[in-house]
Image: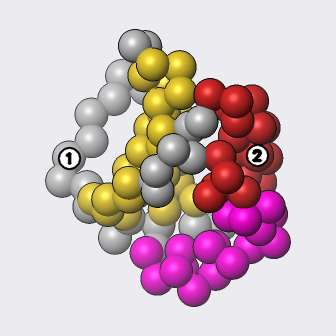
């Protein structure tokens, strides 16, 4: 069963561009992973330094065992403490229903 991670970020204003560049590299790389389903990245319209990321993967265990240790994530993970005001907020969700016009 697929799993969705909802991850909230509050970025230091001076680090916003670096945060976006590093995350773009990760998102561009992970879309090629076999167990990747989709991702949607959001910005808070009231605060340009608050972001929300939805990542859906086919297998939670694969995320833990394989995806989190991919080399393309290393610079991202190492930089996070310097980029964020506070640790990211991560929650995990399982799908119940999906609706789309696609």
Image spot of residue 90 (x, y percent): 38, 58
User: Who's the residue at 64% across and 81% down the image?
Assistant: 66
Question: Where, quadrant-wise, is the C terminus in this rendering?
Answer: top left
Q: Would you identify the image quadrant in which residue 77 lies?
A: bottom right
Image spot of residue 42 (x, y percent): 48, 29
User: Who's the residue at 38% across and 65% down the image?
Assistant: 2
Dot 1 crowding, Cα within 10 Å, few <14, some 14–19, many 20+: few
**Which mark, residue 49?**
none
- Relative to 56, residue 47 above or below: above
Question: Where, quadrant-wise, is the N terminus in this rendering?
Answer: bottom left
Instruction: Provide the major secondary structure of the magenta segment.
Output: helix
- Highlighted range, magenta: 60-78
Dot 2 crowding, Cα within 10 Å, few <14, some 14–19, many 20+: some
Residue 11 is left or right of residue 86, and the answer is right
Are the residues tagged 2 and 1 within 8 Å (C-beta)? no
Image spot of residue 59 (x, y percent): 46, 74
User: Who's the residue at 62% across and 28% down the image?
Assistant: 13
- Relative to 50, residue 26 above or below: below
Q: Residue furthest left?
A: 96
Name the residue that disc number 2 marks: 22
User: Who's the residue at 47% across and 66% down the image?
Assistant: 58
Q: Residue furthest top?
A: 46
Foreground residue, 73 or 66?
73
- Depth check, mark 2 against mark 1: the one in front is 2
What SS does tag 1 mark? loop
- Tell me, yes or no, if residue 56 can be seen here: no
Name the residue that disc number 1 marks: 97
- Tell me, yes or no, if residue 99 can be seen here: yes
Image spot of residue 26 (x, y percent): 72, 52
* Residue at mark 2 to residue at mark 1: CA–CA distance: 32 Å
């Amino acid at each position: 069963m697929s799993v969705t991670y909802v991850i909230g970020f509050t970025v230091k204003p001076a680090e916003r561009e670096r945060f976006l560049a590093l995350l773009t590299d990760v998102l561009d790389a992970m879309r090629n992973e076999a167990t990747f389903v989709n991702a949607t990245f959001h910005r808070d319209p009231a605060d340009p330094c608050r972001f929300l990321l939805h990542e859906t993967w086919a297998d939670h265990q694969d995320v833990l065992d394989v995806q989190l240790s991919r080399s393309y994530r290393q610079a991202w993970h190492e930089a996070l403490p310097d980029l964020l005001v506070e640790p990211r907020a991560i929650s995990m969700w399982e799908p119940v229903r999906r609706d789309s016009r696609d």
